[in-house]
Structure formats: C-alpha cells, structure tokens
Image: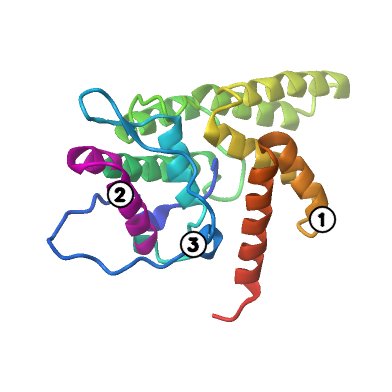
Amino acid sequence: MRRIQRMGWAWVLACAAGCYTGVEPSAPAQPRSLQDVDVDGGLSTDTAGRFVFDAQARALFDHFLVATGEVDDDALRLRVVREIEQRLPGQAASQAIEAFDAYVDYRAEATELVQPAGPGPHPRVGLEAQLADIRARTVGDVAGVPDEGPRLAAAVRWSAVADDPNLAVSDRREQLRKLRSQLGDATPDDDPSRLLLRVRAALADIPAEDLDARRAVVTGLAGAEAAHRWIALEQRRAAALVSPG
C-alpha cells in the first residue's frame, strides 16, 4: 500500500499502517490550518468494541486531511494516530488507524482515476467499475464512505454532454440540469463530508478577500459558529502562504 505522500485533494483521495515499536514518537508538527480549530466528527465502536467507520469517522479523517501539504506527511499521519489513540482503546484504535490509511489510499487512487494522465481527452469507459474495484481494495463496503459510483457516472455523462457539438443549447442546458441534481443527491445533505463539499462548491466563485460574503454563505449552510471557524481557518492558511519559512 502507498505512503501518505500520495495524498491529494479531489473530493476531495497512501497508506502505511504504523507498527508500535515501544518508542514514543516526538510531538507532531502543528498544521497552521488546524490551530485553534475543534476536531470535526467523532469515533465510535459497536457493541463488540470494534471500530465503526461511519460518517462521523470520515468527517474526523477529512478534518485532518485538510492540512495535507502544510506539514510533513508522516507528521500529519502521526497527529491522526494520536487523536485516534486518545479516543479509542487498543484493538479499536488499531482498526481505526488501518481504516484511516485505507481511506487515504482510496482518495489517492480515486483522484488519479478521474484526473487526466496527460493531454487529450480523458478516457471515460469503465470508470465506474474501476472506482468500485478501488473501493473494494481499500475501504471496502463501509457506511462512512458513500458509494461515489453514481456520481462518477453522472460526472462522466456531464462531460460528454458539455462536449457534444451536436446538442442544441436548450437540450444541453436541460440535460446538465438533470445531471446536476444527480451529482448533488448521491448522499444525504446532512452527511458531514457532503456538507464540506457543498461549502467549498458554494464558495468557489466568491473572491477570497470578500470575507463578509464568504461568511454569509457558510453561515447559511453550516451555522454561525462553523462560519467563524471556517473564515479563521482561511485567514490562517493565507497568512501561512505569505509568511517566510
């Protein structure tokens, strides 16, 4: 399985399960984007004490993965491992760490799948089956990671419709409208990770410097407290980009 260096942002999609050596590692570096920000999501177990990879667990993993690239990849993984070990006992913690590594691998491979490898048209045939294979080899059939196959199929269809020179403007607009609905309804609106994607999509066309407009959008989708945290996080990341070192 791949190392975390392969992490990239798509829908946002390597892996090396850590082994305990008896030596306590040094404190991981603190990503600026995570400073003074409460951890999203949560971790839980079933009645047998096994880790449950649900939507809350995925939201917790996504919370830390936002900082990908800000610090050394091993340091970022170590921060996740420590968070898990503070929340879960022995075997459940090991299962959660394994799930995190598998989720990182899933994100990385899925990102490669949907991004063109070079110039020219992106091959669209068989993408849904390939995504299903990636899922089976990484996270498996867990509730916390929704089946993105239908959304991928809709995205492929969207690209084909948008590029079809034979479609009338009105027909193209109507087909894209229907596909937009399919892209947006793949998972429940209250899914934590889906909410993150909705916020990012809503902010895509709003200038970074227009803080009032961005705050209003996030407030409408996630509430005033979340908006305050989101804007503070954006400002810290912007500062990190311009600060020396």
77 in the magenta segment: yes
Point out the frontmost of discs 2 and 3: 2
Read off the magenta span. Answer: 75-96
Q: Position of residue 100 (x, y in %)?
A: 34, 43
Looking at this view, is 48 or 150 the one in front? 48
| Extreme residue toward the front, this view | 225
Mark 2 vs 3, N-terminal side:
3
Give the residue drawn at x 18%, y 43%.
90
Looking at this view, is 93 or 124 the one in front? 93
Q: CA distance from mark 2 to mark 3?
A: 24 Å
Q: Amino acid at mark 1?
A: Asp
Which residue is tagged 3? Answer: 69
Task: Say if residue 49 shows up in the picture.
Answer: yes
165 in the magenta segment: no
Looking at this view, is 224 or 160 the one in front? 224
Image marks 1 and 3: residues in contact by CB distance under 8 Å: no
Which residue is tagged 2? Answer: 86
Q: CA distance from mark 2 to mark 1?
A: 38 Å
On the rendered structure, is 172 left or right of 134? right
